[in-house]
Image (tube, coloured by chain):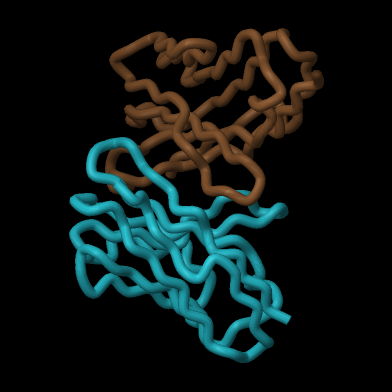
Chain colours: A cyan, B brown
Amino acid sequence: DAGVIQSPRHEVTEMGQEVTLRCKPISGHDYLFWYRQTMMRGLELLIYFNNNVPIDDSGMPEDRFSAKMPNASFSTLKIQPSEPRDSAVYFCASRRTDTQYFGPGTRLTVL
Amino acid sequence: GENVEQHPSTLSVQEGDSAVIKCTYSDSASNYFPWYKQELGKGPQLIIDIRSNVGEKKDQRIAVTLNKTAKHFSLHITETQPEDSAVYFCAAKSGGTSYGKLTFGQGTILTVHP
């Protein structure tokens, strides 16, 4: 199995630009999670989906952030407009049973 | 909601020594407790987990213990090696309305000196 796939691995953009992060979960997994990791705040859950339906988006910091899961094999996290404080590593994770698998992450830098 | 506290935040040991990381949780309905290892530039990787119906689990040099009454669980690494150096996270899977969600501790930076 290829594991959770995320793209891009690195993204550098300027303040105000739209950023789209992509995730392909492990085939057969029905839960998908988006996390943000920073030194100051640690690993934060932003949103998670079950069977492509958003279950809990209480961790989404503000309206500039949105996430979609149009089908079982693809999800996006969009930031529009981006700000320097959004700089972080964003992880996608998926699971079918209790065991949750993380992707390699996308390192986002907003200048 | 669930709250997970992890200690210590940093831990430095000599190669061959043992390392212990401790976590406490608040939601008595939590029933699954994984431990993740994160190396620099990589995503967290599951190293061991335990369910609430088990008190201890061991896998080679690593073991996890769970005390449901006290609501705490610990990671034990024996015969540490330099390649064990990483950030370790504990987590708890909540019950109730947060079903399916993991709450993570703040992480422990483990350094194993050769």
x and y percent of residue B54 in the render?
33, 12
Towards the viewer: A22 or B24: A22
B58 lies left or right of A36: left
Towards the viewer: B95 or B41: B41
Name which residue lies at 66% across and 56% down.
A38
x and y percent of residue A107 in the render?
61, 65
Towards the viewer: A41 or B113: B113
Name which residue lies at 46% across and 68% down.
A7
Compared with A29, A47 (above or below) is below
x and y percent of residue B96 in the render?
28, 41
**Image quadrant occupied by the C terminus of chain A:** bottom right
A3 lies left or right of A72: right
Compared with A74, A82 (above or below) is below
Towards the viewer: A48 or A63: A48
A70 lies left or right of B54: left
Name which residue lies at 47% across and 31% down.
B26
Q: How many marks?
A: 0
x and y percent of residue A30 in the render?
21, 53
* Picture quadrant of residue A97: top left
Name which residue lies at 50% across and 19% down.
B73
* Picture quadrant of residue B22: top right
Report the residue that reaches farthest toward the bottom: A16
Compared with B66, A111 (above or below) is below
